[in-house]
Image: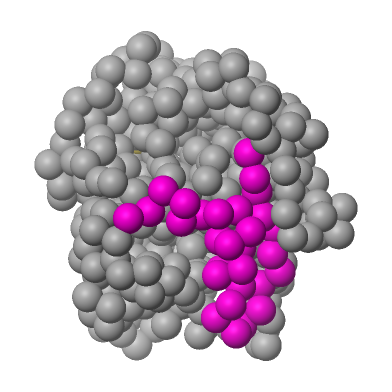
Amino acid sequence: MTKQSVSIVRYRENNETIRNALELCDGFKELKANDKILIKPNIVMASRRKKIPLYGVVTTTRVIEDIIILLSEYGCNDITIGEGSPFHKELELSTLNGFKSTGLTRVAEKYGVKLVDFNKSEFRSVDLGPTKVKLARESLENDFLINVPVLKTHVQTTVSLSLKNLKGCLKQSSKMKFHKTGLEEMIARLNTVLKPKLSVIDGVYSLERGPSTSGRAYRTNLIIASRDAFSGDIVGATCLGIDPLTVEYLTQYGALTGQSSSLEDIEIKGESVDDVIFPLEWRMMKAEQIMADYDIKGATFQWPGNTLCTNCAIMSDAFLGVFLKDYKGSYFNNIEFLMGDKVHPLEESKLVFLLGNCAVKNNSDCDKAVKISGCPVGVGDSIVKVYNTLGKFKGKKLLAVRMLKGMAEKLGIYEETLPRTFSYDQPDFDRAFYR
Ligand code: SF4
């Protein structure tokens, strides 16, 4: 059996890292100068708001630019960057805002590259077995797909690497279907249809407790490249200190294709895994721990599992973020926040906030619930209803302050910071990677 090659290269800011990584894994072996090329980065959460940190959350623009330079040297001039980012009006999240705030718009203009918002694309229907899904036309109609995910952990799927990144090619409604049908199996099946010819895992920054801004980023300076996405992911997971056999979408893909998940069946070039391994925690912090960090007693939330779609997950990050800050040091008589499908209130909870259509629908008979509908549920709507319900005086006062902050944000004179217990300082955390 021929071993797949995966290169591991330490990132150095000299334009040569990506070239080196691609030479080692023969990344352009199947490339032709007149190929129609699609680059798929990971822009899961990038808003117009500058204070949302990008490190380890989205692909660094610098790595994308380095890939484009190499493609141009090769004579390629039909290059598209495509992504379908989560859309969230209140947080100003959209693919377009993601392209702008990461600097991809500038890069596209500089090199004559097309930008495509998959959310606004034409879609093609594809049968993945358990269900049919819709994929952006560009993800299917290209000659050379280059997948550029981030080296990061993921609270739902343990890691989010090349195979997971292709979920961004789906129509939003199909992404929701993925969560309801079985996220891991659907990711595995999607990758039997979409076959990148090159995967470059961007580990300039890596994210603990990913995939979004509630995680913590580290400067890890790694690039992992392969012509085989699955082998690249096996190596990527191992570099994060995670046994690939515990990553269900990888084991399911291995079972579907008969491909080995063993590191021994991969030819690693460049650095060795042992020299670069950087173990990161992927599990979400326990609710008690998060509440205790803010000295909040008598409030909790349950882990909603994989049925929670990305849009509601982003909302929960934002909502819990402001709740924790506003109610720091408060005591409650057993309140609970509930999101996602198939989750039911704890017996001891006296007041339950059902956030989003899934939680509302599945607990329609709950007589201790405040129901807040929406698909995804709105951050502002949740704040108004939760704050109004909690404490006649404190809740209303906090709500008034929150509304003033909201107006000030719209006027551009105030920016909400998401609560974090750490800071990202120069020189390791360098915004120039996204310009
Ligand atoms: S309510 Fe939230 S979790 Fe449920 S389908 Fe809508 S976005 Fe997904």
Residue 349: percent from left, percent from top: 61, 28
217 or 252, which lies in front?
Answer: 252
User: Residue 346 location, x and y as percent?
Assistant: 62, 23
Q: Residue at x 30, y 38 (%)?
A: 170
Q: Residue shown at 43%/71% (left/top)?
A: 70
- Magenta span has 56? no
**Quadrant of the frame with the N terminus:** top right
Q: In this view, does 294 lie to the left or right of 385?
A: right
Query: Is 300 or 181 nearer to us in this picture?
Result: 181
Magenta extent: 4-32
Residue 105 visible, this orientation: no
For this orientation, the residue located farthest to the left is: 122
* Residue 116 % position (x, y): 21, 58
Question: Can see residue 174?
Answer: yes
Q: Residue at x 71, y 69 (%)?
A: 10
Labels in figure, total: 0
Quarter in which the C terminus is drawn: bottom left
Q: Please tell me in which quarter of the rendered image ligand 1 is found.
A: top left
Residue at position x 50%, y 38% in the image: 163
Residue 32 in the image: x percent, y percent?
Answer: 32, 55
Task: Compare residues 237 and 154 and report the one nearer the observer.
Answer: 237
- Was residue 18 drawn as part of the magenta stretch in this picture? yes
Q: In this view, does 1 lie to the left or right of 165?
A: right
What is the basis of the colouring in this image? one colour
Residue 285 sits above or below residue 151 on the image: above
350 lies left or right of 179: right
